[in-house]
Image (cartoon, rainbow, N blue to C red):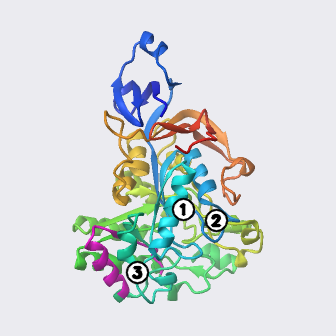
Amino acid sequence: MTDLLIKGADLIGKGRKDILVRDGRVAEVGSVSAKDAASFNGTVVDADGLVLLPGLVDLHTHLREPGREDAETVYSGTRAAAKGGYTAVCAMANSYPVADTAGVVEQVAALGKAAGYADVQPIGAVSVGLEGKQLAEIGAMAHSAAAVRMFSDDGHCVSDPIMMRRALEYVKTFGGLIAQHAEEPRLTEGAQMNEGAVSAELGLPGWPAVAEEAIIARDVLLAEYTGARVHFCHVSTARSVDIIREAKARGAKVTAEVCPHHLLLTDEAARTYDPVYKVNPPLRRESDVAVLRGALAEGVIDAVATDHAPHAPQDKDCEWAAARPGMLGLETALSITVLALGGPSAVDWDVVAERTSRTPARIAGLEAHGRDPQPGTEANFTLVDPAATWTVVPADLASLSRNTPYAGMELPVTVQATFLRGRATVLNGKIAEETTE
């Protein structure tokens, strides 16, 4: 394994430091003399002007493999993750076949290891086939080689309270958690966008905010009753934030994520009828966006999660009603997060690190990730240029799909390098082509 020396990186709260990596782990953090740097037999990276973050961790990624390799594969998705600064992603269960058995989650984990661009932690399904009728093989997945700790029927709500209670009690026995897609299905049947003034003007069936809030309120109570952990996916409304804040004040074991697009875009985008803006949960009102941004900065919302949802052209290049919901997110998430937290000149990089890396890693139980560099830790980190900007060109994205809502936008902050156990997966802003060990 090649040794690595990063010169003069801005370590959050510690000023400029050199970082020496040997055999994939941090050996020294401090100052390396010019003489020693000149004689160093390894890769040297000049990080002058760059901020070093612990490698980003995504709690909510759709890699589509197995089954929809026309939209994304584990290989292409983890390349996109590395380009976005991620060293670990949690792969959602709604593949074909569904990741509801030990065999499927082990396959996904093995594909991630073979690709080598980011660690892939599978998320297991709560119910067989995501159908909400019978619990999946939760114990078998937890004790498999993939060591699954998060379970979700994302794309479908675990709407049956009895099943949700049983799932929470089950995962509590081994320290796992349920990641809930909060959507009362009876309130969203046929829904196409956020229910409000814009949906009324456009004549599109509305997705009411209360459909999310009712499930969050119910599951907070179930989490308190069972003493188990519940994580709320893609929180999108102001009242959901209120419920989560109140639950945390009572000591409930709840955590929550917000997606980048819910921090920037609003339901006004639906006026274009461009299906790229169709997502579940839908884009909400400007007032919701403002509350979500404040909750993220405050820590009521624990993490930014991309809900990276690649789709093949036939699933997006069609009329709004027929289009599948979802947006790309891995390669743009850091830039959007920085915008939401005040912009590159005002952002608190420690808060960025907490919401995009440290806390997501703790929630997912990824002990080797989300750690600031210190001797002995795995060298999983990202170098970003806070002064640079870039324009989103869909054809330049690493994902197989092109359904980004940010096409043509100039965004702040560029990822200059990503390191997974000291090995560059991205260097000088470009994907390293040979990554497997």
Residue 282, quarter of the rendered image: bottom right
Tag 1 secondary structure: helix
Residue 259 seen from this side: no
Mark 3 or 2: in front is: 3
Q: Position of residue 115 (x, y in %)?
A: 57, 52
Residue 382 seen from this side: yes
Q: Mark 1 — residue?
A: 286
Tag 2 secondary structure: helix
Indicate whether residue 399 is drawn in magenta.
no
Q: Mark 2 — residue?
A: 268
The Cα–Cα distance between marks 3 and 1, rounded to whole angstroms, is 21 Å
Indicate whether residue 178 is drawn in magenta.
yes
Q: Mark 3 — residue?
A: 214
The Cα–Cα distance between marks 3 and 2, rounded to whole angstroms, is 24 Å
Mark 3 or 1: in front is: 3
Residue 62, quarter of the rendered image: bottom right
Residue kind at label 1, given as amino acid type: Glu
Q: Is residue 435 left or right of residue 33?
A: right
Q: Nearer the viewer, residue 382 or 354?
A: 382
The Cα–Cα distance between marks 2 and 1, rounded to whole angstroms, is 9 Å
What residue is shown at x 30% (from left), y 78% (from top)? 170
Tag 3 secondary structure: helix
Give the magenta range: 163-183
Q: In this view, does 59 lie to the left or right of 251?
A: right
First along the sequence among labels 2 and 1: 2
Marks 2/1 in contact by CB < 8 Å: the verdict is: yes
Q: Where is residue 84 in the image (x, y as percent from the top left)?
A: 56, 47
Residue kind at label 3, given as amino acid type: Ala
Residue kind at label 2, given as amino acid type: Glu
Q: Which of 133 and 48 is in front in this view?
A: 133
